Image (spheres, helix red, strand yellow):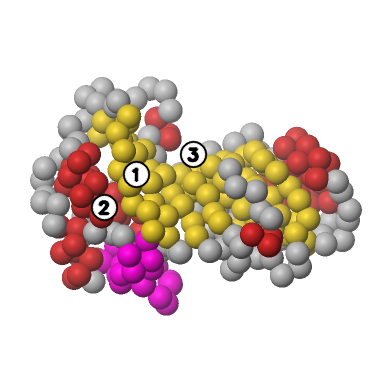
């Protein structure tokens, strides 16, 4: 039987999603909890691996098991066994051909900046702090250059292992809410550190250090050395994923 789950987690205590030789990870924590509830060894697959310190509002995983539990039993059992920074939002049986990663049609991320001259005390792990005033209108203009299908080589990590740097971005939106500046982005896939590298371009543009057109110049260059720094993981969250309707995966 194949089970899918929707997962929410605070990335602050974890060294990313994927199991490492040393250090606490989301995958290791989930596999231990699921194996305990299932009373058998369990391996999981996720829709998108997150880096150290990056959170998720709606990560989707799946696993195969020989045991039968109701959806409620899975959800309650896992939430009682999981690390306190992980919540299981839902759990349900899915078709055998469903795959959390390969069945996904789009993925979304959300990056939040606290833009004020005083550092945050509350929620500091879920925000990036920028004390210099940001012009969100210029940031939004620059983000428009991301829309469509492009070679994002200039915005990938030097350690990125993906063989395909061409991605299609369908949403790249900047919004301000008081002192908070939000970046919402959706694509058919992302490269390693791609969102953080995008923010490393948008923030200097917002501060007036670079022109709006700098984003286009960087994308066209296909050269990582032409781009800005990699922005902090604080403030970045995996926001959600979509699948074909036939799999009936909840959207949150």
Q: Is residue 197 magenta?
A: no
Dot 2: what SS? helix
C-alpha separation, residue under disc 3 versus residue under disc 2:
27 Å
Residue range corresponding to the magenta coloring? 148-169
Image position of 183 (left or right of 41): left
Q: Earlier in the sequence, mark 1 or mark 2?
A: 2
Q: Position of residue 95 (x, y in %)?
A: 75, 64
The reply to whether residue 146 is visible in this rendering is yes
Image point 25% across, 55% down: which residue? 144
Dot 1: what SS? strand
Q: Position of residue 160 (x, y in %)?
A: 39, 68
Mark 1 or mark 3, whichever is nearer to me: 1
Q: How many neighbours does mark 3 have within 10 angstroms: few (below 14), some (14-19), or many (20 or more)? A: some
Q: Earlier in the sequence, mark 1 or mark 3?
A: 3
Mark 3 or mark 2, whichever is nearer to me: 2
C-alpha separation, residue under disc 1 versus residue under disc 2:
9 Å
Image point 58% across, 43% down: which residue? 252
Look at mark 2 in the image and give the residue it sits on: 143
Query: Is mark 1 in CB contact (under 8 Å) with mark 2?
Result: yes
Look at mark 3 in the image and give the residue it sits on: 12
Q: Is residue 150 magenta?
A: yes
């Amino acid at each position: 039987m194949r089970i899918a789950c929707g997962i929410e987690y605070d990335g602050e205590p974890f060294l990313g999603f994927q199991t490492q030789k040393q250090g606490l990870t989301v995958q290791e924590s989930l596999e231990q909890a699921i194996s305990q509830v299932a009373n058998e060894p369990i391996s999981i697959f996720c829709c998108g691996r997150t880096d150290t310190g990056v959170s998720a509002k709606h990560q989707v995983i799946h696993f195969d098991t020989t045991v039968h539990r109701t959806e409620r039993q899975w959800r309650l059992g896992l939430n009682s066994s999981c690390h306190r920074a992980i919540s299981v939002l839902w759990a349900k049986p899915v078709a055998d051909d469903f795959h959390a990663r390969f069945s996904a049609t789009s993925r979304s991320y959300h990056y939040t900046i606290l833009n004020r001259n005083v550092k945050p005390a509350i929620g500091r792990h879920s925000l990036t702090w920028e004390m210099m005033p940001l012009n969100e209108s210029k940031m939004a203009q620059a983000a428009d250059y991301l829309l469509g299908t492009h070679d994002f080589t200039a915005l990938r990590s030097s350690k990125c292992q993906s063989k395909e740097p061409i991605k299609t971005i369908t949403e790249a939106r900047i919004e301000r809410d008081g002192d908070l500046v939000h970046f919402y982005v959706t694509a058919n896939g992302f490269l390693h550190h791609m969102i953080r590298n995008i923010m490393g371009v948008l923030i200097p543009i917002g501060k007036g250090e670079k022109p709006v057109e700098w984003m286009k110049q960087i994308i066209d260059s296909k050269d990582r050395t032409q781009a800005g720094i990699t922005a902090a993981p604080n403030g970045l969250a995996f926001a959600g994923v979509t699948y074909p309707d036939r799999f009936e995966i909840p959207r949150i």
